Every structure is written in structure tokens, then in C-alpha cells.
Image: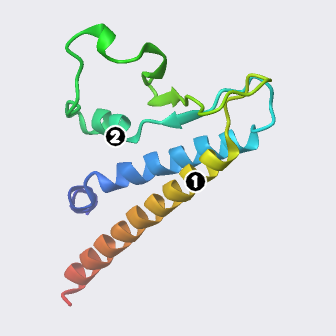
Amino acid sequence: MMRILEGSLGLHEQALGLRSRRLEVLARNIANADTPHYKAQDLDFKGALSRLDNEPSAMSATHPSHFPVGDTAGSDGLRFRIPFNTSMDGNTVELSVEQAHYGKAASDYQATLSFLENRVSGIRKALRGD
């Protein structure tokens, strides 16, 4: 039974977990908007999903200096956000930017969740013979 679900849900189950994790990171940024020296982070969703899927990324460097060093994602997929405007206290959180990213991420999460709900509903119908 579980193999049926694993094959039919595919990568969307893992994508939902990553989208949830990204919402947590963005919420942490918003919560620390007034914390001196806090560095805003974001999850490299495409990179993290590629690592989960074990497929090579569509974009790869041919030389180590082709990508900016400070913007590269760590092994956990997190990368530091480069602010549009610098802050006097060293905080890189820009509240309006973070709120916009959070709204988009919440919408993406809901879309993935709806897709999974529809897929599970289809599987239920197939198992019942509807």
C-alpha cells in the first residue's frame, strides 16, 4: 500500500516538506527584523529539491569563481539574503521583502498541498473502484 502512495505522490511530498521549511526560515527572518546583526536567510528551493531528487542541477559552474562566494547555498540549502538597503545595526532583514517572500511561499505551499490532496483523492477513488 505504501509503495502505491510513494510512486504516485512522487516528488511533491518532499516539495511540501521543503516549502514548509522555507516558511519557517522566512518567519524566523520576520521575527528577527529588529535583532542587531541578524543575517536574513532563504532556502534555495530548487537546489534543495534537486539534491533530494538526486538529479544534477540544470545550472553548473565551469569555474569556481563563476558564482558569487557569499551567495552559495550550504549543504542544508540555506543561503544568506543580500539586502537592497543596508542597515546601521548590521541586520539584513528587510521587512517588506520578507513579507512578500512569505506571502509567495505560503501560496506555493498551499498549491502543493492542494495538488497532493487531489492526488490522494484520486488514489482513494481508484482503490474504491469509483
In percent of width and height, residue 65 lies at: 32, 9
Outermost residue toward the bottom in this view: 130
In percent of width and height, residue 7 lies at: 20, 56
Examine the rendered structure and indicate whether residue 128 appears above or below residue 118: below
Please state which amino acid type lies under the numbered disc 2: Lys
Name the residue nearer the viewer: 37 or 12.
37
Q: Which mark is residue 100?
A: 1
Name the residue nearer the viewer: 100 or 46.
100
**Image-quadrant location for residue 59:** top left
Badge 2 element? helix
Name the residue nearer the viewer: 35 or 86.
86
Label 1 and label 2: CA atoms lie apart by 19 Å
Outermost residue toward the front in this view: 85
Residue sitting at x 80%, y 26%: 36
Residue 64 vs residue 104: left or right?
Answer: left
Q: Which mark is residue 46?
A: 2
Badge 1 element? helix
In percent of width and height, residue 98 lies at: 62, 46
